[in-house]
Amino acid sequence: MRAALFPTRRKAATHNGHPAPTPVPTHHPEDRPLVSRPLNASERELVDWFVDFTALMGVPASVGEIYGLLYLAGRPLPFENFVERLGISKGSASQGLKFLRGLGAVRVVSVPGDRREFYEAEISPTRLVAGFLKEKVQPRLKESDERLARLKKSLHEMDEVDPLLADRVHRLHVWSQRARQFLPVVAGLVKIRT
């Protein structure tokens, strides 16, 4: 009776006295079905990590959410998947994808048998930082230098200059030049060329 209720386990086949290795399924992420449900708690936590990360760069939360979803998906996703799973508007999804493509952190790919546009992440977050430095920070620093140069010139043309104002402009100019010198070092660390 006990044997019928609690069947005995068969011993795994052995090879030279050792259990046979369990075969490990080799699945490509693309082999998994496309998920359209909302994020579960663990997925939301990972996506929120990217939201916090991209917030440091001063970009909308939707940009971090989109990149985070692509990062965890491990496969190309169609546009509507961002709207369905993240609960963001089509406009936010469109703008976020455009921004990420401009950084080189996301690319458009085709999926055989599907006419929709699919998006795939460059899975190294380094690429996200690198793109931000190249596309956003470097041009801003250049604009800042030009603006400060104009300000210094206007101060030199004035008859009477407030010494404190002149000192503050000079300090900003020095800081801006150092930041521009430092940027290639940071860019080198994230393996891009500015």
Image: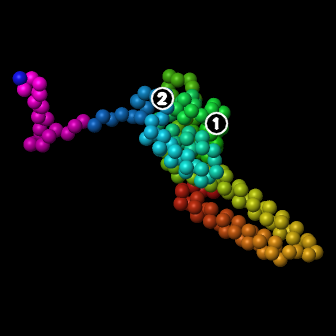
Q: Is residue 126 above or below residue 157?
A: above
Query: In the rendered structure, does residue 15 fall within the stretch colored magenta?
Result: yes
Query: In the rendered structure, does residue 44 fall within the stretch colored magenta?
Result: no
* Percent of width and height locating residue 78: 54, 30
* Percent of width and height locating residue 146: 79, 62
* Percent of width and height locating residue 52: 55, 49
Type of amino acid under label 2: Arg
Q: Do the residues labelled 1 and 2 touch (CB within 8 Å)?
A: no
Query: 136 or 160: nearer the eye?
Result: 160
Disc number for residue 148: none
**What residue is disc 2 on?**
37
Q: Is 168 situated left or right of 84 in this image? A: right
Type of amino acid under label 1: Ser
**What residue is disc 1 on?**
92
Q: Is 60 situated left or right of 27 in this image? A: right
- Looking at the rendered structure, the secondary structure element under dot 1 is helix
Q: Is 12 situated left or right of 92 in this image? A: left
Q: In this view, does 193 lie above or below 172?
A: above
Query: 156 or 110: nearer the eye?
Result: 156
Tell me which segment is drawn in magenta.
Answer: 2-23
Camera sees residue 4 = yes
Q: In which quarter of the image is the N terminus?
A: top left
Most frequent secondary structure within the magenta stretch: loop
Mark 2 surroundings: few (<14), some (14-19) or many (≥20) residues within 10 A: few
* Percent of width and height locating residue 62: 60, 40
